[in-house]
Amino acid sequence: MIKALTQKKRSFMTRFLRVGDIPALLDLERRQWTAEQAADSADFRARIEAHPDLCGGAFCTRTGELLASVFAKPTDDAEWTAPGSWAQSASLEGRVAERLPRQRRARCMFGISLTSVDPGAAVQLLAFYYLYLLKRGYSEIFLGSPMPGLKRYLARHPDASVETYARTTRSGLPIDPQLRYYHGKGWKEIVAVKENYFPHEASCDYGAILKARVPFRHLALLFRFVPVPLLRTVSALAPRFTLPTEETRSTSDAPAGAT
């Protein structure tokens, strides 16, 4: 999930998270999520120990403050064919993926959570992981998104279905603000719409499972030899090209992937 509050323009350093970062993760979590939504120290430890390279953070280079975090796990298309909650999606045991051959699971990943208090930090962290997943040979990224416009839409259109709302577009873009946000970041395919997915009042607790393809997948063999520090350097350019220079306030207040 993502929830961002714009700060003054900063520069960021991205790196893989360590167990020692858990206090900072808990502080970030408390700033952005309710007690019901938030992960705890045991959740963070389990994720970091299970897949340390799929747990990343963006830190302010001036203060060292953790401004964004992302957690992911290997997955497979088959994991999203049955109903289920975000807790099942985020489970490190993987209901379906655990029974699949490792070589199949390694091609896809699920974004457990993306939490941010600075949009620049979130952009840079996502850019780094796009490049890193390309290096690791991943081809697709799944995430779970709320639909914060759903409750208001159903109040105005009581006969409409949730599935219809999720897939309705205007000028080629989803009418739901959060789905539209992710559409612009590459998550354009809705794999499933799930009831009781995550506690989010504006979404009536529904969630949409989205899928994006890792860009430039044909360059995976070349990226395999690119060192991680160089990926960090390149990703640091992302906020300059994707965010306005003036200070703005983000309107995104809903989870994606959730934490």
Image: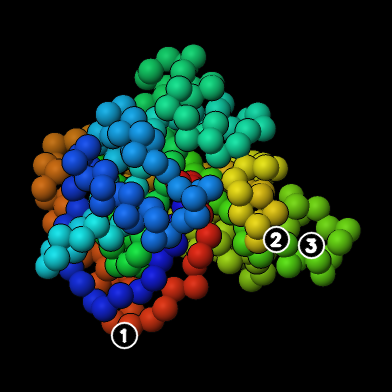
**Amino acid, disc 1:** Glu
Which residue was labeled with disc 1? 246
Q: Residue furthest right?
A: 159
Nearer-the-camera pick, 59 or 193: 59
Nearer-the-camera pick, 183 or 203: 203
Disc 1 element: loop
* Residue 180: percent from left, percent from top: 56, 63
Q: Please give left or right for residue 89 compared with residue 237 in the image.
A: right
* Mark drawn on residue 84: none
- Mark 2 neighbour class, 10 Å CA radius: few under 14, some 14 to 19, many 20 or more: many
Among the two numbered marks 3 and 1 on one chain, the one whose residue lies closer to the N terminus: 3
**Amino acid, disc 3:** Leu
Q: Residue at x 56, y 26 (%)?
A: 78
- Mark 1 neighbour class, 10 Å CA radius: few under 14, some 14 to 19, many 20 or more: few
Which residue was labeled with disc 2? 150
Query: Do labels 3 and 2 touch, CB within 8 Å?
Result: yes
Which residue was labeled with disc 3? 154
Seen in the picture, residue 17 relative to 126 is either above or below; the reply is above
**Amino acid, disc 2:** Leu
* Residue 100: percent from left, percent from top: 47, 16
Q: Residue furthest front?
A: 35
Q: Residue at x 11, y 42 (%)?
A: 227
Distance from disc 3 to disc 1, alpha carbons, whole Å, reads 36 Å
Instruction: Residue 223: tell me if it is visible.
Output: no
* Residue 179: percent from left, percent from top: 57, 59
Q: Residue at x 88, y 58 (%)?
A: 159
- Mark 3 neighbour class, 10 Å CA radius: few under 14, some 14 to 19, many 20 or more: some
Among the two numbered marks 2 and 1 on one chain, the one whose residue lies closer to the N terminus: 2
